[in-house]
């Protein structure tokens, strides 16, 4: 149980375009989903927290107009990187949790974004 | 500010030995504690969670929690080369849904 999927697993896009990443909880209802970014050889950096049907809560320093998060249902959240630039190239990872599991977070496999 | 500290390593152990990974945290209000394993280029995988003082065992893994000392550890018995990865300690404070992650300890198990 507790499987989280992400799509796509990798994406290459041109500077100035937008990219959407999907995160799905496959076998449980995720009351909360999280979006992280990880640069090479660095730790996870939480970008935002989203609850189904509510606006996302962004961490300090994360531009909410650039990283659009939608949590439309208990099994789906999306992250859209708008007007991407090369410095947005990173490993984006979502996680999901259900209060039934005492806030354990289960991670998706991640999406590697390269902006050229 | 909530902080979670881990030795970055690498921690090198021979195959079959016990690997001991340590983590300290600053927020006394922390309620939930997790260990994640992350292979290079992959996302983290939850391997242990612990919520009360004492030991919790799952197969070759044992998590130990001491809230008075604000200390949590992970023991890996009979270490295997496939255990070579970065181990992340994560802590959740009461009333919060977010986790605070340490920077991780790299474990290298040599055959």
Image: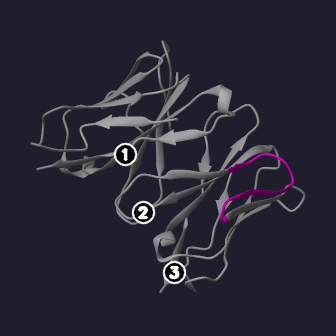
Q: Are marks 2 and 3 on the same chain?
A: yes
Q: Are marks 3 and 1 on the same chain?
A: no
Q: Is residue B55 located in the magenta-colored stretch of the structure?
A: yes
* Marks 3 and 1 in Cβ contact (< 8 Å): no
* Marks 1 and 2 in Cβ contact (< 8 Å): no
Stretch in magenta: B49-60
Q: Which mark is residue B109?
A: 3
Q: Say which chain tag 2 marks.
A: B
* Marks 2 and 3 in Cβ contact (< 8 Å): no
Q: Say which chain tag 3 marks.
A: B
Q: Position of residue B88 (x, y in %)?
A: 57, 59
Q: Can you tell which of label 2 and label 3 is closer to the viewer? A: 3
Instruction: Specify the farthest residue to the top.
Output: A53
Residue B27 shows in the view = yes
Q: Residues within 10 Å of mark 2 (few under 14, many from 20)?
A: some
Q: Say which chain tag 1 marks.
A: A
Q: Residue at x 24, y 51 (%)?
A: A87
Q: Is residue B15 located in the magenta-colored stretch of the structure?
A: no
Q: Return the residue nearer the eye: A63 or A96.
A: A96
Q: Which residue in the structure is indicated by mark 2?
A: B39
Q: Residue at x 75, y 56 (%)?
A: B26
Q: Residues within 10 Å of mark 1 (few under 14, many from 20)?
A: many
Q: Position of residue A90 (x, y in %)?
A: 29, 51
């Amino acid at each position: 149980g507790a499987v989280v999927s992400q799509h796509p697993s990798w994406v290459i896009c041109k500077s100035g375009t937008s990219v959407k990443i999907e995160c799905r909880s496959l076998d449980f209802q995720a009351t909360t989903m999280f979006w992280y970014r990880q640069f090479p050889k660095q730790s996870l950096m939480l970008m935002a927290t989203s609850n189904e049907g509510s606006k996302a809560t962004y961490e300090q320093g994360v531009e909410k107009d650039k990283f659009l998060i939608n949590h439309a249902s208990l099994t789906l959240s999306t992250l859209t990187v708008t007007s991407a630039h090369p410095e947005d190239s990173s490993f984006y990872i979502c996680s999901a949790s259900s209060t039934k599991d005492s806030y354990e977070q289960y991670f998706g496999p991640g999406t590697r974004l390269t902006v050229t | 500010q909530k902080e979670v500290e881990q030795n970055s390593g690498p921690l090198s152990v021979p195959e079959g030995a016990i690997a001991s990974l340590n983590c300290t945290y600053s927020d006394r209000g922390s309620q939930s504690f997790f260990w994640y394993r992350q292979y290079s280029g992959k996302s983290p995988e939850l391997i242990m969670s612990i919520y009360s003082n004492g030991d919790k065992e799952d197969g070759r893994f044992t998590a130990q929690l001491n809230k008075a000392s604000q200390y949590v550890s992970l023991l890996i018995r009979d270490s295997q080369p496939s255990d070579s990865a970065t181990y992340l300690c994560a802590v959740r404070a009461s009333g919060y849904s977010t986790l605070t992650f340490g920077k991780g300890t790299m474990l290298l198990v040599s055959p």
